[in-house]
Amino acid sequence: MDTACWNAVIVGCTNNGYYLNSLRTFNLMRRETQVSHDSITLVSVISACGNLDLLLEGQRSHGLTVKTLVDADISVQNALIAMYGKLDGVHNAHLVFNFCNNRNLCSWNCMISALSQNNDAKEALALFCSLDFEPNEITIATIISVCTQLGLPGFGKKIHGYVFRFQFHTNSFVIAALVDSYSNSGRLERAATVFRH
C-alpha cells in the first residue's frame, strides 16, 4: 500500500470518530512499512489526538511535522492550533498561529475558538475585530459565544444583524449560538423566536 491508501484508512477513521483506530493505523504504518506519511496523514492524526485528549501524542505528531518539513502546511498548522487550544491552553496555539505565513479563515477560526475555549474572551473578540477575511458561520457562532461570555448584548445585537444580512440564519450552529446567548442573558422570548424561525 502507498501513502494514499494508508491515508484513506487513517482519514476515514478520524472523520468517522474512530480516533483510536486512526492512531493505531498510523503507528502500524510507521512501524511495519517503508511508506512515508504526509500532511494529510498528520492532520488526521493531530485531530485524533485532540479528540482523545492525548497531548503528548499530539506533541510527538507536531515534532513529526517539523522533522518531515510539513509544519509549514496550512492544514497542519490549523490542526495544531485546534489541538493545542483544546488540550494545552493558548500559548502553543498562539505560537503556531503566529508562525503561519499563509493564514486562512480556518486559521483565524481555530485561534478565536482556542481563545474562547480557554476563557480569554477579550482577546478572542480583539482577534475577531482584526480578522483579515469575511467571517463564515463558524466564525459567527464562535463570536456570538464570546459576546455572551463578555456580557456584551450590544455587540451581540450587531452580530445578530450580521447573521441575517449574510444569510447565516439557516445555519444550525449559528442558531444554537444565538439561542444560547439570548437564554443566558435572560431574554427567553427572543431565544424562543430565534429557535422557531
Image (cartoon, rainbow, N blue to C red):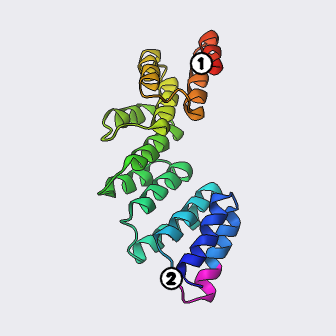
Mark closest to the chain's N terminus, 1 or 2: 2
**Where residue 131 appears, x then y in whole percent?**
33, 38
User: Which quadrant of the rendered structure holds the N terminus?
Assistant: bottom right
Q: CA distance from mark 1 to mark 2?
A: 50 Å
Q: Is residue 38 above or below residue 143?
A: below
Which numbered disc, 1 or 2, marks the residue closer to the eye?
1
**Membership of 33 in magenta stretch:** yes
Q: Residue at x 50, y 82 (%)?
A: 36
Three-letter residue code for mark 2: Ser
Q: Which residue is mark 1?
A: 194
Q: Nearer the viewer, residue 62 or 69?
A: 69
Magenta region, residue range: 28-35
Mark 2 neighbour class, 10 Å CA radius: few under 14, some 14 to 19, many 20 or more = few
Q: Which residue is mark 2?
A: 36
What is the quadrant of residue 129 in the picture?
top left
Q: Is residue 156 above or below residue 34?
A: above
Q: Is residue 154 above or below residue 175?
A: above
Q: Residue at x 53, y 70 (%)?
A: 41
**Where residue 153 appears, x then y in whole percent?**
47, 16
**Membership of 165 in magenta stretch:** no
Mark 1 neighbour class, 10 Å CA radius: few under 14, some 14 to 19, many 20 or more = some
User: Which quadrant of the rendered structure holds the C terminus?
Assistant: top right
Three-letter residue code for mark 1: Val
